[in-house]
Image: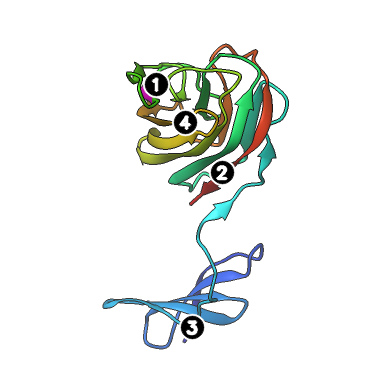
Amino acid sequence: MTATLNASTANGVILTSDTSGNLAIQSNGTTIATAQSSGLTISSYTAGASLITSGTAQASTSGTSIDFTGIPSWVKRITVMFNGVSTNGVSVVQVQLGSGSPTTSGYLASATGALNGYSPLVTNPTTGFQIIADGSAGYVRSGTLVCTLVGSNIWVAAGNGNDSASARFWLCGGSVSLSGTLDRIRITTVNGTDTFDAGSINILYE
């Protein structure tokens, strides 16, 4: 006897128990996995399929901020990707996480940037996860920032990359506690008025 435990007409995925009492996961009538006391057996897998979802890349060529909203509540890790990002001013580029709106304070973060022949500059920002420790209209930023959920809406972050215009590298990281479940990410500058003028930004989430 097969008993349906839960059904979703939105995506065609149902949970049933098979004739041996094992939990079966079905999609459009095809069993794709069976859960037994010994573990999970995958019955169907599409080569090249990924559990990582890509956002839509946004051109960072205008405006004072780039927003990614509608991030699902089940997301546990987000990677922010910078590709040749530049601004028209000296304010530092930063990433802000948010629940309903971007969180603009309470970050326990650090950022640094170093260029051959110069001492590294280190900052401890509280308004976001900063990319490089300083800013310049000449910087061309590429790299990633990975944000991971610890639990209880607490997120930690670690990032690295380079400024291809000056061959400097950057490192950053920290943590922030959100007021609720994360649903958005904003990339902006500390002063909020410098505008983006080159490059693109995208996110991956899982």
Nearer the observer: mark 2 or 4; the answer is: 2
Q: Are marks 3 and 2 in contact (CB under 8 Å)?
A: no
Figure check: 31 above or below 201? below
- Which range of residues does the magenta coloring cover? 109-113
Label 4 sits on a secondary structure element that is loop
Q: Earlier in the sequence, mark 3 or mark 2?
A: 3
Nearer the observer: mark 1 or 3; the answer is: 1
Q: Earlier in the sequence, mark 1 or mark 2?
A: 1
Q: Are marks 3 and 4 in contact (CB under 8 Å)?
A: no
Residue 37, percent from left and from top: 27, 76
Residue type, numbered disc 4: Gly
Figure check: 5 above or below 169? below
Residue type, numbered disc 1: Tyr
Kindly report the distance in space between the C-alpha atoms of the residues bearing marks 4 and 1: 15 Å
Examine the rendering and report whether any part of residue 101 can be seen.
Answer: no
Identify the residue position indicated by label 2 in the image: 203
Residue type, numbered disc 3: Thr
Q: Earlier in the sequence, mark 3 or mark 4?
A: 3
Nearer the observer: mark 4 or 1; the answer is: 1
Residue type, numbered disc 2: Ile
Pointer 1 local density, CA inside 10 Å: few below 14, some 14–19, many at least 20:
many
Q: Nearer the viewer, residue 102 or 109?
A: 109
Kindly report the distance in space between the C-alpha atoms of the residues bearing marks 3 and 2: 41 Å
Label 2 sits on a secondary structure element that is strand
Identify the residue position indicated by label 3 in the image: 2
Which mark is drawn over residue 180?
A: 4
Give the left or right position of residue 150, taking residue 6 as reference.
Answer: left
Q: Main secondary structure of the magenta part?
A: strand
